[in-house]
Amino acid sequence: MLTRLGPVLAIGLLTLPVAFGLAGTVLPAFGYLPALGGKHFSLDPFAVLATEPALFASAGMSLVAGLGTALVSLTVVMLFTAAWVGTPAFRRMERLLSPLLSVPHAAAAFALAFLIAPSGLVARIVSPELTGWQRPPDILIVNDPMGLSMMAGLVVKEIPFLLLMTLAALPQARPVRTRALVASMGYGRVAGFVFGLWPVIYPQIRLPVFAVIAFASSVVDVAAILGPTAPAPLAVRLVGWMSDPDLSMRFLASAGALLQLVVTALAIAIWIGLEKAATGLRDRFAFAGVRLRCDGMVRAGALAMMLTSAAIIFAGLAALALWSVAGLWPFPDAMPASYSLRTWMRALPQLRDPMLTTLAAAFASSAVAVVIAILCLAHEDRMGHAPGRWAFSLIYLPLLVPQVAFLFGLQLLFVLAGVEATMPALMLAHLVFVLPYAYLGLKDPWRAFDRRYDQLAAGLGKRAWLRFLHIRLPMLARPILAVMAVGFAVSVGLYLPTVLIGAGRLTTVTTEAVALASGGNRRVIGVYAFMQMFLPVLGFAVATLVPALIFRRFRDMQY
Amino acid sequence: MRKLAISMALLALGSMSAFAGGSAPDPSDWDAVVEKARGETVYFNAWGGSQNINAYIEWAGEKLKERYGVMLRHVKLDDTANAVASVVAEKAAGRNEGGTIDLIWINGENFAAMKRQGLLMTPGWAEKLPNFAYADVENKPTIRTDFTIPVEGLESPWGMAKLVFFYDSARTQAAALPKDADGLLDWARQNPGRFSYPQPPDFIGSSFLKQVLAEKIADPALLQKPVEEADFEEVTKPLFAYLDELNPLMWRSGRAFPQNYPAMKQLLADSEVDIIFAFNPAEASSAIANGELPGTVRSFTFPGGTLANTHFLTIPYNAPAKAGALVTANFLLSPEAQARKEDPAIWGDPTVLALDKLDPGDRARFDVIDLGVATLRPDELGPALDEPHPSWMERIETEWKRRYGVAN
């Protein structure tokens, strides 16, 4: 049966690239890579790695970034949900989720940088009236050695992600009833949520939290834009070594990628320790009967943090857009002195190829991912049960293993196979990262579908695939297109897979934008970051408009 | 695992197989070169960090396609050394034909490295290009001597460079501007946090180090010989003593550096620094024309002289589209392309051609160019200091990275 292909394809796509990629990283890390003259296993690459200056500073930075990002974003999401779930403010925030999620990490990082740099929009708006600054203050904000701005950039992107995951887990915790119960026992909103609902929700979003830790501890694009430079976080240095045309550096890079794997694993292990400590703390407060009735400050604070994180992205994007059409814009003017379309006119012809590559890779990978996800879900229907816990964890595999750790090996395999920098290879690499989102996004709408339609159609003698084509596909058109839009956005935002598999010859809007970051030309960065953000928005617009058009004469399908 | 090992071994074998060398096109039979070039795709590896340069290359690509049927693909590099290393790797893998690079924008130590390792297309071809007849070899000696290394026709001149400094006359007193490296240090003492240089090994940043070295070294003649012939530690002591003092006086107290020239230009535009420098005398005018710098920016140079050199185009020995690369190099040397390049509204890179060798029509293309308010006239540019032997740059960069590159 066709549907049996679904799980096979999915498991193959989720595990094989990771497994082969890891193998392709481990072997050179131990000195084995015949194509480059490494014919014997040795520990030399690690010895060389150990002599790299400031290696521990880099690895430590990555560890702290992973834990710090997860801690801050999870706390904000938990407190916000605790304080505001079920209110109009919460529903309004829910509506902002899709646009926030669709902003690629790199664009969000640029947005933050354009706001908080000493010459950024914030300083311009308050200067010189409030600060007296006629010129930007000489302080190191972006690229600060502590990595604070890098973590801030990650936090503003991970908050919407974790909030989405929390929203998906929320209904199973029966929030309304539980809240009524704990409120009747005299608990404040926040305390009641943390004691009564969070223990049910957290286990369901644990893997996404691990994914956040893994991502933040091994991120390359955000770190390259906002992170410290002397020394840079580990993953940034690894990519530098990996793309060094002196191929012998690949041994060093591979050894470093294993170190990255250890750092990420360590971060997750520490997190598990923190989980235990937090549980203990919660129990102490619960047993002590702390009810936290007057939590107005906490609630206001949670709302403020949530609004700030959203505002940073939107205001930053506005600053990016403004820079892309700015003529001369000297400090401390809050607005450009003149406007011009020159940057756009110059950039557009050069944008053509990266745009085509971006669109092709994003469209192909999201379409294939959705087809595989549908096959998987149809197979589950057939089998009558959802995948087991282990099979389900596999979905998160590409999100939990640091990208550098297996993409290095994957790139090497592609190089040796002579298919690096080809469209199919790039699409395959993107598919690995898009598939989890497609499956996770589609499983709830699919399972929520009313089976009686199916039974009715079957009773009318329709065969399985006709039932799918004529009944289920149109009725699920909306979620399917929405999931495709998510996959599209994920693909557009992918940096490292594109850089490594595209080998510098296949470039997307995202890789071009990050490459321009070091050039510091704000106008050009504005153009590229704007396009980066515009493409996913376009995807979501199509996903919203197409069902509205298809169903314009079907009143019950217009919701 | 076993499968992987087998596939890697097989594929490695495949990638190791060497080809026999093919015959290079002969530029003295130019019509044959043009004929052969038609339909070829030229992968042009050139620094891609500047939008106006990228746009210029884009323009050249359109013309080449139109006139010669040559497809020009700009592979944007952040460091030319990467292109060199790619060719090294290809040679090591026995890929003596069908390499990935057809044309490289190059000079200095990268050219020296490629020439030394036999990675360039031979025999010398550049002086046989039809447009080389216009090159100003008489008055621009660096066209035939690149960082002390004889060029011997292995690279074709593309543009001229001279280190010049820019400041905003609306903010900075012209009278207070430094007149040499020592003056710059004094100026930085009085204006802490208002100067920086791009982080070496960025080309412009390294050039600043060489400028200081050229001024501070006891015996400048040493720089014309390979670094091995000098006591590096001893003779560079003044340079690093200078940097030890300058760096803490710089922007962000020397804890962060702009990554390259365009980033430094943005710092001047934002009033974060007051003095910047570039290798292109028309760069400030070009930036003013593009609205990137205020119209009050002006240029100055050190009366005692600043570094000057020529930048070139070269063809790797294993380039698959040699004919196309020759046609491209020749087109970029044409009066039409050179005049467009010199216009600050486009790029502003000084020409390598001798205007008196051109016919009146072509000379007119140059005469109409407005070099812009911020560009010094050729007689104001000051004496040219010779570039040191390329081996110096490498040692200085390594030493800089060791001292200032990690964890301050």
Image (cartoon, grey):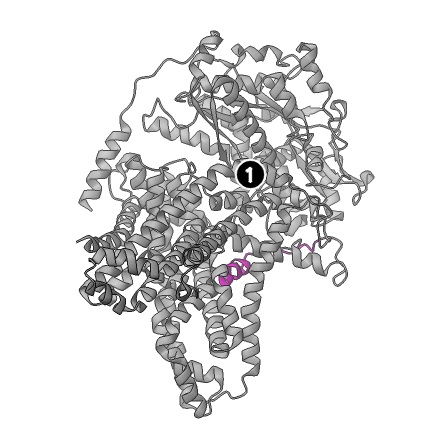
> In what quadrant of the picture does the C terminus of chain A appear?
bottom left
Q: Residue furthest top?
A: B29
Given residues A129 and B120, the one toward you in this image is A129
Given residues B345 and A39, the one toward you in this image is B345
> For numbered disc 1, what is the local secondary structure?
helix
Task: Identify the residue at horizontal 55%, vertical 64% (top origin).
Answer: A310
What amino acid is found at the position of numbered circle 1 in the picture?
Leu
> In what quadrant of the picture does the N terminus of chain A appear?
bottom left
In the image, the segment drawn in magenta is A136-156
The x, y position of residue B24, in whole percent, is 40, 14
Given residues B105 and B251, the one toward you in this image is B105
Q: Is residue A149 magenta?
A: yes
> Would you say B273 lies left or right of B2 here?
right
> Would you say B63 lies left or right of B213 here?
left
Given residues B131 and B19, the one toward you in this image is B131
Q: Looking at the picture, does residue B346 appear above or below residue B320?
A: below
- The residue to which callout 1 is attached is A348
Q: Chain of mark 1?
A: A
Q: Looking at the picture, does residue A5 appear above or below residue B229?
A: below
Q: Residue B226, can we see it?
A: no
